[in-house]
């Protein structure tokens, strides 16, 4: 469905309040803020490209807690670079590149939580670094909850070449303007494919979180199709934390995304190519390409990079296919 069709669909309000134990845990973390003690990653499982091939089609369903409001399309603010900036970048789909005007934009109090809009609060900011330098990340990107303690993001965000002191990654769903409205968690383990090129059809990892953040805000499903036409026939959405706006501190959304081309890659993975936007550069990496499928929000790709093939224009590339659902399935089978 396109954005106007989604906008016309009614919300499904929450039917229960936030459970007291979850609310207490979140509010405690907010008070602790950046002083929270960091946790290093322990295991990084590297899958060779000669691994067992995954089915080209697969489905894992999402989950919406009763205390969240299902919103097909949240409040949105049109985003265009300021005209007075001489180096402002052009956005081909400026009419559809939008800021997420979520309730978490307001200052959080210590006694209440902002409304939780599902599935948008399942997407968040990923930071990563080396050793125990938890307050000095090397960079950031975007990730999506796809299970109770599972976060899907781009493999190239994982600090594979870390020093002996180790590595760390952390994830904050619904992150906006330095606020972590639903808490955060460090990553304990990752499983996926080490990227061999940019972009790459296998550019995704499943991350095992120390804290089950999905139990707080829910998670999206994931899906791959054996028929490429099913990718072309949909209009997709994506969310990311691009460096071109507020240094990646606020989420930005693109809607009405069409798949322009599909390239096959290793292990029957796919490179899903879309019209390029400069917002798809730094910070959007790991962000989901997703859609409402049979009433369920499902991720079909993970932002990998961009490329230009021959005379084709520059296009953004999302990594997808059966192996993407395969790494999510690994998390469900081994980390629950």
Image: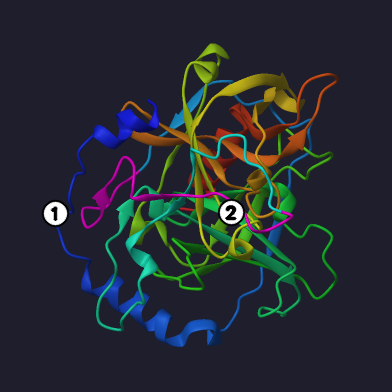
Region rendered in magenta: 63-87
What residue did someone put label 1 on? 15
Which residue lies at the image location 61% right of the left edge and 53% below the top edge? 83
What residue did someone put label 2 on? 142
Which residue lies at the image location 70% right of the left edge and 53% below the top edge? 282
| Left or right relative to 269: residue 331 | left
- Of residues 76 and 198, which is closer to you in this image? 76
Which residue lies at the image location 55% right of the left edge and 15% below the top edge? 226
Image coordinates of residue 153 in percent, x first then y, are 61, 49
- Of residues 66 and 176, which is closer to you in this image? 176
Residue neighbourhood size for the residue with mark 2, other residues' Cα within 10 Å, grouped as few (<14), some (14–19), many (≥20)? many
> Is residue 82 a member of the stretch shown in magenta?
yes
Which residue is most to the left? 15
Q: Are marks 2 and 1 in contact (CB under 8 Å)?
A: no
Helix, strand or loop: magenta stretch:
loop
Q: Secondary structure at mark 1?
A: loop
Image coordinates of residue 18 in percent, x first then y, are 22, 66
| Left or right relative to 55: residue 317 | right
**Relative to 231, residue 184 above or below:** below
Q: Quadrant of the N terminus?
A: top left
Quarter residue 52 falls in = top right
- Of residues 182 and 160, which is closer to you in this image? 182
- Judged by depth in the image, the label closer to the viewer, 2 or 1, is 2
> Is residue 109 a member of the stretch shown in magenta?
no
In space, the residues marked 2 and 1 are separated at their CA atoms by 29 Å
Image coordinates of residue 294 in percent, x first then y, are 32, 26
**Relative to 84, residue 109 above or below:** below
């Amino acid at each position: 469905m396109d954005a106007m069709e989604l906008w016309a669909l009614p919300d499904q309000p929450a039917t229960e309040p936030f459970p007291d134990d979850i609310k207490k845990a979140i509010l405690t973390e907010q008070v602790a803020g950046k002083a929270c003690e960091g946790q290093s990653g322990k295991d990084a499982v590297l899958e060779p490209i000669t691994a067992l091939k995954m089915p080209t089609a697969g489905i894992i369903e999402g989950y919406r807690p009763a205390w969240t409001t299902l919103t097909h399309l949240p409040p949105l603010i049109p985003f265009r670079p300021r005209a007075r900036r001489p180096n402002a970048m052009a956005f081909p789909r400026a009419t559809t590149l939008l800021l997420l005007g979520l309730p978490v934009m307001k200052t959080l109090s210590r006694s209440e939580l902002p409304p939780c809009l599902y599935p948008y609060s399942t997407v968040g900011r990923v930071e990563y670094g080396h050793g125990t330098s938890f307050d000095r990340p090397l960079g950031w990107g975007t990730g999506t909850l796809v299970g109770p303690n599972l976060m899907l993001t781009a493999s190239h965000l994982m600090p594979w070449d870390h020093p002996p002191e180790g590595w760390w990654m952390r994830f904050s769903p619904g992150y906006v303007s330095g606020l972590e409205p639903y808490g955060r968690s460090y990553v304990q383990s990752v499983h996926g494919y080490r990227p061999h090129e940019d972009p790459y059809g296998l550019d995704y990892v499943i991350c095992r979180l120390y804290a089950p953040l999905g139990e707080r805000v829910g998670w999206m499903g994931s899906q791959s199709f054996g028929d490429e036409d099913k990718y072309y026939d949909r209009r997709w959405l994506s969310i990311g934390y691009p460096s071109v706006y507020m240094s990646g501190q606020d989420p930005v959304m693109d809607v009405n995304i069409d798949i322009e081309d599909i390239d096959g890659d290793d292990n029957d993975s796919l490179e899903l190519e879309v019209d390029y936007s400069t917002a798809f550069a730094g910070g959007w990496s790991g962000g989901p390409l997703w859609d409402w499928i049979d009433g369920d929000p499902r991720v079909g790709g993970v932002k990998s990079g961009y490329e230009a093939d021959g005379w084709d224009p520059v296009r953004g590339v999302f990594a997808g296919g059966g192996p993407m659902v395969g790494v999510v399935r690994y998390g469900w089978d081994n980390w629950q």
